[in-house]
Amino acid sequence: MIANHIHDALAQVRKMREIILAKRNFRGYSGVARALGGLAALCGAAFIFFTRISKTPESHLLVWGAVLCASLVINYGALFWWFLCDKESERDLRKLLPAIDALPALGAGAALTFALISRQHYDLLFGVWMLLYGLVHVSYRLSLPGENYIVGLFYILCGTAGLFAFRDFYNPWPMGIVFFAGEFAGGYIFKKDRGAVR
């Protein structure tokens, strides 16, 4: 009799825990949009490699800036579409807080990028971008699927290696391949978590 009550109480605690975790899970990001962002990085690398653009920092930064802009438009466009059109968002600004939590790390990435460019340390850019993007991922530990944390660690490891191994800013493949792999994996994780096309 007491054992049944304990079993029922434990089942209720587990159920409450699942409900709390489900409410904390941020569903505003799109797996498809994320995968498209990774594809944009791979296309940027291919464009640099196959068109043989001039080996100047300005031309390469222009391409990577275009990749960044395309990825931001795709991903934040999908986020705003979710916020405005999905019943789950309820158009409640508090539901966007996880996305807002990423802004300090992204802002730090922008500041470091401009500092490195102003000092002509272009070879450090790929590693710094990967490291900070990895930190953005791990900051979502409690609001996105757990596998996303692993993607963040992947970016951090690649970024750390990049700071010491990527000596050629004009070789686009480390950047293109790492971001393609990370974003494609992240997109798959989001899609699997939602069980839908989004």
Image (cartoon, helix red, strand yellow):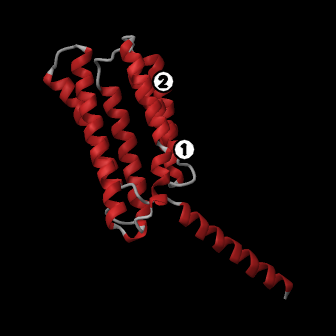
Which residue corresponds to the image point at 35% horizontal and 67% vertical from the top-left?
86
Q: Are marks 2 and 1 in contact (CB under 8 Å)?
A: no
Instruction: For the C terminus, give its image quadrant.
Output: bottom left
Please provide percent x and percent y for residue 36. Answer: 28, 47
Q: Nearer the viewer, residue 52 or 87?
A: 87
Please provide percent x and percent y for residue 128. Answer: 45, 25
Find numbered disc 1 in the image and state the secondary structure of the residue it sits on: loop
Q: Which residue is mark 1?
A: 139
Please provide percent x and percent y for residue 131. Answer: 48, 30
Instruction: For the N terminus, give its image quadrant.
Output: bottom right
Which amino acid does the dot numbered 2 rest on?
A: Ala
Q: Earlier in the sequence, mark 2 or mark 1?
A: 1
Please provide percent x and percent y for residue 110. Answer: 40, 29
**In this image, 59 relative to 134: left or right?**
left
* Mark in the foreground, 2 or 1: 1
Which residue corresponds to the image point at 48% horizontal and 23% vertical from the top-left?
161
Find numbered disc 2 in the image and state the secondary structure of the residue it sits on: helix
Which residue corresponds to the image point at 15% horizontal and 20% vertical from the top-left?
52
Disc 2 packing (10 Å; few <14; some 14–19; many ≥20): some
Q: Is any atom of residue 154 visible in this view?
A: no
Which residue corresponds to the image point at 49% horizontal and 40% vertical from the top-left?
136
**In this image, 112 relative to 81: left or right?**
right
Task: Kindly give the residue lying farthest to the right in the view shown.
Answer: 2
Q: Which residue is mark 2?
A: 161
Which amino acid does the dot numbered 1 rest on?
A: Ser
